[in-house]
Image (cartoon, helix red, strand yellow):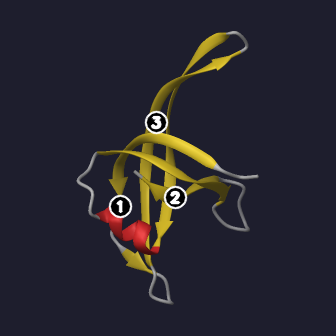
């Protein structure tokens, strides 16, 4: 199963674009800062990751004033078949 729930701030977005079939595409950067329990202790996390969304979710993300704090649901996959660099695809957010 590949499901992800992550909170953070959208700190940057690219210019809106559309797929050849007309779906709106959102590409941006999410900054996450938090703590997780690991091996009996707390580990501080602070990172940025590329996020992508399509269609209605993309349109709603472009309406947010930046920086925008969100909790996203989605999945992780390689950016393309030619690379193993991972990207977060947003399927919904609040």
Name the residue rendered at 67%, 67% in the picture: 80
Question: Which residue is farthest bottom?
Answer: 21
Q: State left or right for residue 76 relative to residue 89.
A: right
Per the image, the residue denoted by label 3 is: 32
Picture residue at 31% right of the left edge, 64% below the top:
62
Q: Is residue 22 above or below residue 34?
A: below
Q: Furthest-right residue in view? A: 1
Q: CA distance from mark 2 to mark 3?
A: 15 Å
Q: Which mark is residue 90?
A: 2
Q: Secondary structure at mark 1?
A: helix
SS under mark 3: strand
Number of marks in picture: 3
Task: Give the SS element for disc 2.
Answer: strand
Rendered image: mark on residue 61: 1
Q: Residues within 10 Å of mark 2 (few under 14, many from 20)?
A: many
The image quadrant of residue 77 is bottom right
Q: Which numbered disc, 2 or 3, marks the residue that appears first in the sequence?
A: 3
Residue 43 screen position, x and y as percent: 59, 17
Residue 26 on image: x %, y %: 42, 66
Q: Residues within 10 Å of mark 1 (few under 14, many from 20)?
A: many
Percent from the top left, x then y, of residue 53?
48, 65
């Amino acid at each position: 199963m590949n499901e992800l729930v992550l909170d953070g701030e959208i700190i940057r977005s690219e210019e809106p674009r559309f797929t050849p079939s007309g779906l709106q595409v959102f590409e941006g950067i999410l900054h996450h800062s938090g703590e997780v329990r690991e091996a009996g202790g707390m580990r501080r996390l602070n990172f940025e990751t590329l996020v992508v969304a399509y269609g209605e979710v993309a349109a709603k993300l472009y309406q947010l004033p930046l920086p925008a704090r969100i909790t996203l649901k989605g999945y992780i996959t390689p950016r393309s078949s030619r690379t193993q660099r991972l990207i977060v695809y947003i399927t919904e957010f609040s």
